[in-house]
Amino acid sequence: MPWVAMARGGLAVLPLLLAVAAGRPTAGVMAALGTLLAAINDRPGPRRTAVLRLSAPALAGACGLLLGSYATALTPDPRRALVLPLVLAALGLLAGAVSAIGPVASGIGTQLLVTAAIGAGMPLPEPGWQRALFFLAGAGWLLALRLLLPSPGRTTRNPYRLDGERGAVAAVYTAVADLLDATGTESALSRRAALTTALDQAQDALAGPRLRRFASSAAERRLHARFSAALPLAEAATALAWAGTPLPARAARGCRALADAVLLDALPGVVPAPSRDAAGLRSLDNALLDAVTAFDTAGPAGLATARTRRGPLRAALRRATGPAGREYGTRVALCLGASAAAAQALHPEHWYWLPATAVFLVKPDLGPLASRALCRVAGTLVGAALFALLVTVLRPVPLPGAAGLVALVAVCGALIPLGMRHFAVQTAVVTVLVLALVGLGGETQATWNRVTDSLLACAIVLLVGHLPLPGRRGNVVRGRLTAASQAATDYLGHVLSGSEDRPGRWALRRAAYRSLAQARTAVELSAAELPTLARHTEGAADVTAVLERLVDTTTAAAVHYDDAGRLPERDSERLNALLGELDSSRAKAAC
């Protein structure tokens, strides 16, 4: 149970409560909207990475409110049915392309479009600039709670100092120990994937503000050094898992002791050493010795954590303007424009719900298209029915004014972190919360209109999502596979060159496994679509599997090279065979 996140969600109702007490419920609605959208973007992790993850989408949401509000105010009433859908479609084209850059950019694009639709269609007495300020106040309040409330399970004296970063780095050592325990079993592959996830999360945590190569404190330098020390351990554990020989329990105890030391920001004490009767075990023992040394010093951050991509702005622009960005932007624009036009024709007074619903439905990172449409329908029906039941129950209760609706918002705000685990549950909770906010804003009898709007939005998104567009489908999968192939090739080339630059090798290994994890996620998502969409990426899973075996074999070869000073002939033969298998899989893949 995410108790701290649920406490943040419940306390986030304070701006709404103050606004209602001051006689300005519509201003509180905008503040509550800011906290709601910020809560959806709130994820577990370090505080400093949460600043960007929450603030950047919130700023985009304020801009969306301004654009939507003034687009309606400056457009004559007879022309709104034509102009507003075109404005939202143009924003959808831009925001959809931006969303292809990454997770934070996806949140930016989503909030921009949702608030633009709300600003254009929700009748509130405040002008656009006041709506934007109230929205930012609500989001800022949730961000303040995120920074001020202590983290769960804190183990150091200072509950705010690098707690999330320490937890992320400790999870890497724990994942290494789990992989060592699983070596020679059927769960080794899933443990290796879990290790990749832990490494990705720790790398992201250490890339937050002021956690760069030249860290600003001894504690940060220690944390960077301890993460760098985990990279050779991960390499050795991967090589041992590739060999498939079961290991004694003693092999993993040292990594678990290091994980506890990271959490406590202390020295690990006595670390059991594994035996040294194989190349992988010798590499593991050497890595443990180096890690203990790193724990005893506050050395500089390793190159593997310090390296950043060259030209991040150029790379972001390339993703936004690439095939995946263009395709997603086009589909978002079509969905948003069509839903806004349909809503204007059906009920021009309160039409914003339909395009706002379409924005969430069209997001590919929420699951397969048909699945998220069904979840949206189920969640909306349950949420609307639950809201109607709660209103009926609360009506005879002697609560002053809108206190019942405010209490409902507080309860739903606390349930959002729990509901984030399933899209249907999240939809049900958000539906109840939004209907309560709509009631505070002055709209009545809105419950079942929201159900019909959600059904229509699902139909529009399903239709547009399956429309044939110019060019090939599966751009996201194809782009991820291309990046993973290039990263695997770079890593293999470095190992085959015999370079002694081990930090550089670990950085290339990290890039290879990270890109492989992203490719695997994209492939699995595409495979779960309906056949009309899934057929465009047939065979992609085979390509990903071959790439994973290639990178695992390259890791084992690197460990063997370090141990013997040369690449064993057996590893060379396996690498050549995998390269041939990769070419064959690429030729058969539809993408």
Image (cartoon, grey):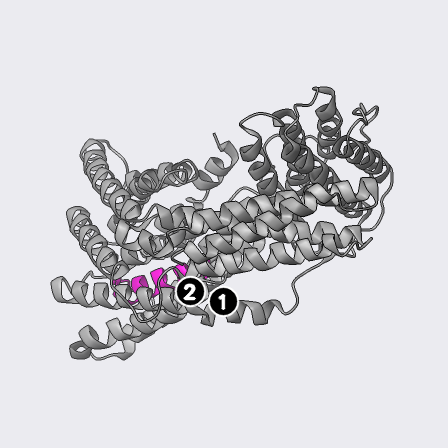
Closer to the camera in the image, 187 or 221: 187
Give the class, few, some or many, for how many residues have Cα within 10 Å of label 1's Cα (few <14, many ≥20).
many
Q: Tell me the kind of residue under disc 1.
A: Arg
Tell me which numbered mark, 2 or 1, is placed earlier along the sequence.
1
Give the class, few, some or many, for how many residues have Cα within 10 Å of label 2's Cα (few <14, many ≥20).
many
Residue located beneath label 1 in the image: 319
- Give the x, y percent position of residue 339: 22, 63
* Above or below 165: residue 364: below
Q: How many labels does the image show?
A: 2
- Give the x, y percent position of residue 55: 52, 57
Taking the image as drawn, is residue 48 in sight? Answer: no
Q: Which mark is residue 324?
A: 2
Closer to the camera in the image, 290 or 115: 290
Horizontal placement of 369 versus 293: left or right? left
- Give the x, y percent position of residue 521: 46, 47
Horizontal placement of 371 versus 475: left or right? left
- Give the x, y percent position of residue 74: 28, 79
Going 52% across and 71% down the picture, which residue do you hit?
A: 317
Magenta residues, start to end: 107-124
Q: Do the residues labelled 2 and 1 touch (CB within 8 Å)?
A: yes
- Quadrant of the image for the C terminus? bottom left
Q: Does the magenta segment cover residue 205?
A: no
Closer to the camera in the image, 331 or 220: 331
